[in-house]
Amino acid sequence: MSPSHSIEIELKFDVDAGLPAPDLTGLLDGTTVSEPATYLLEATYFDTPDTLLAKNRMTLRRRTGGTDAGWHLKRPSSVPGGRKETTVEFDDADSGSTEATTAQVPAELRSQILTVIRSAALIPVATITTDRTVTNVLDADGVGLAEFCEDVVSAESLLPGGGVNRWAEWEFELTGGDTKLLKSAKSVLRAAGARDASSVSKLARAIGSQPHDDLIRALPKKATALGLVQYDLASHRDALHAWDPLAREDAYDAVHQMRVAARKIRSILTSYPGVIAPEMAGPVADELRLLGEVLGDARDREVRLESNQLLLAREDAPDDLVKALIDDEKAAHQQTLKSLRYALSTARYIQLLDDLDALISAPIPGPIAHRPARDIVSDAVGGAYDRMTKAEKKLRRYSPWSPDWVEQLHTIRKRAKALRYTAESAAPLHRKALDRAGAEAKRVQTHLGDFNDTVVNREHLAAVAANESLSSEAVFVLGRMDAHEESRGRRAVKKYRRTRQS
C-alpha cells in the first residue's frame, strides 16, 4: 500500500477524568457538529533503545482501531504548529497480526527515519490504549472542518524502569478548517476546564520527555576557527538530514536543496583546510563529492524536464517530439530517483552520516584550529574572490562564444559558487564586507548558472535531433527550441556582464 501524507495541526489539552465536553456547535457562523462516535485504539510505539526518534521529535507507531488503522510516522513540519504525518495502511499479512514487530515496519517509513536511526535497531518502547470519542465539526454544507477527540489513555512504557500511566485529554485537529476555527476552539475548550497539555504527545507522556540536543548553538563573540567550522557544519548537516526524506519522496525542490546542503558542507571543509586535520576531513569531503554527483544526476533531469516543458508550451509540437523530450525524460528521471533512493539506503551513506557527526562533535584539530575565526574567514573569502577574478581575466584569452570561452564561463560559475558558500559560512560573524562579497558571487553564479543550463540543454536537443526516426516536424520544432535556448543564454551572459561592470 502506498503511503499517504498529511500535515497535522492540532490543539492538545489535559483534562480531569470525566470532565464533560462543551457543545462545539457554532464555533464559527454556520458550523454544526456530528453525532459522537467511539473507538478503541491500540498502538505500539517503536524507537531505538536510546530513543533517537523521540529526541528528534518523531514518533513511529502501529495502531489498530479507529478510521486510520495502520503504521504512522509523525515528524516535524515547516508548517507553523504542524507535524507531517505519513500513514501506511496494513497489508493482508500485517492486518491479521495481533502483535507488532519491527520486521513489519514498512520500508517507506524506515527510509524516512534512516538519517536518525542509522544502523540502530528499532524496538517497542511503549503500548498505548485509548478510549476515544470523536465529534466532527462541520460547515454549513456538512463538510468536515475539524475533529474533536475525548481520550481516556492508558500507557505502559516498555523501557527499563518504565511503568503504567493513565490520564484524560482532549485533542482538536483541523481537517479542513483554518486558524480562525482553531482559535475559537481553544477559547471554548479552555473555558470548559481544559489545561495546557503537559506533554507534546502521548508517547512523550508515556516514556517521559526526551532531551533534544539542539545541533545549532549560539556562536561566541570571540569564536575560534574550529568553533565556526563546527557551527556551520552542524547547520548544513541538519539541512541535509531534513531534506533527505523529502528527496526520497521526490518532493518539490528537495533533491536540489539536499544537493546544496552537501555542497556547502564540502565547501566548508575545502575552504578551511587547516582547521580540521586532513586525515579526518578529507575522506568526508570525498564522500560528499560522490553524494553530490548522485544528487546531481536527479537534479539535472529535473532542470532539463522543466526547461523542455516550458519550451514546448510555446510550440505546436508533434507527438514523437513530446515523447522524446517529456515522456522519455520522465521515465529517465524516475530511474535516477530509483538510483538515488538506493544510494541513500547503503551502508556507505550511513557511514558518511556517522563520520560527519564525528567531524562535528569530536574533530581532530588542524594547525590553525585555534586561530580567531575573523582572521580565518577573511583569508578564505579573500582567496576565493581572487580565484574567481583570475578566472574572469583568463576569459579574455578566448574568442567570445567559442568552446573554450564557454568552458571558461563554466569555471567562473564554479569559482563564484565557491566564493558564495565561503562568504555565507562567515555570516554568523556579521561582517558586512564579506556579506557583500557573497551577494556579488550569488549574482554571478545565478546568471552563469542560467547560461550553463542552456548550454547543457542545447546539447541534449542536438542529441535528440540526431535521432533519424524523428519526424521532419519534430526536427523543425527542435530548431526553434534551440534558437530560444540560445537567446536565453545570451541574455544570461549579458546580465552577468552588467553585474561585473556595476
Image (tube, rainbow, N blue to C red):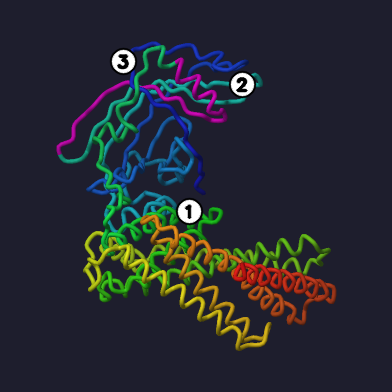
Q: Neighbour class for label 2 at 10 Å: few (<14), some, many (≥20)?
A: many
Q: Which element type, helix, strand or loop, lies under badge 1? A: helix
| Label of residue 246 in the image | 1
> Which of marks 1 and 2 precedes in the sequence?
2
Residue 110 lies left or right of residue 297; in this view the side is left
Residue 349, horizontal then vertical, whole percent: 36, 66
**Which mark, by number, is residue 179?**
none
Asked if the residues shown at circle 3 and circle 2 are in contact, with their CB atoms under 8 angstroms apart, the answer is: no
Q: Position of residue 225 (x, y in %)?
A: 28, 64
Does the stretch in magenta take in 157? no
Kindly identify the residue that appears in the image at 54 percent across and 17 percent down: 34
The image quarter in which residue 480 lies = bottom right
Q: Residue at x 34, y 42 (%)?
A: 57
Q: Is residue 457 above or below residue 185?
A: below
Q: SS of the residue at dot 3?
A: loop
Q: Nearer the viewer, residue 249 or 130?
A: 249
| Residue on which disc 2 sits | 139
The residue to which callout 3 is attached is 17
Inspect the image, locate mark 1, and give the three-letter code of the amino acid beneath it.
Leu
Q: Quadrant of residue 270?
A: bottom left
Label 2 – label 1 distance at C-alpha:
33 Å
- Dot 2 falls on a residue whose secondary structure is loop
- Tell me which residue sits at (47%, 37%) in the image: 80
Crowding at mark 1 (Cα within 10 Å: few <14, some 14-19, many 20+) = some
Going by the picture, which residue comes out furthest to the left?
161
Query: In the rendered structure, which disc, 1 or 3, sits on the residue that comes first in sequence?
Result: 3
Nearest to N terminus: mark 3 or mark 2: 3
Q: Amino acid at mark 2?
A: Asp
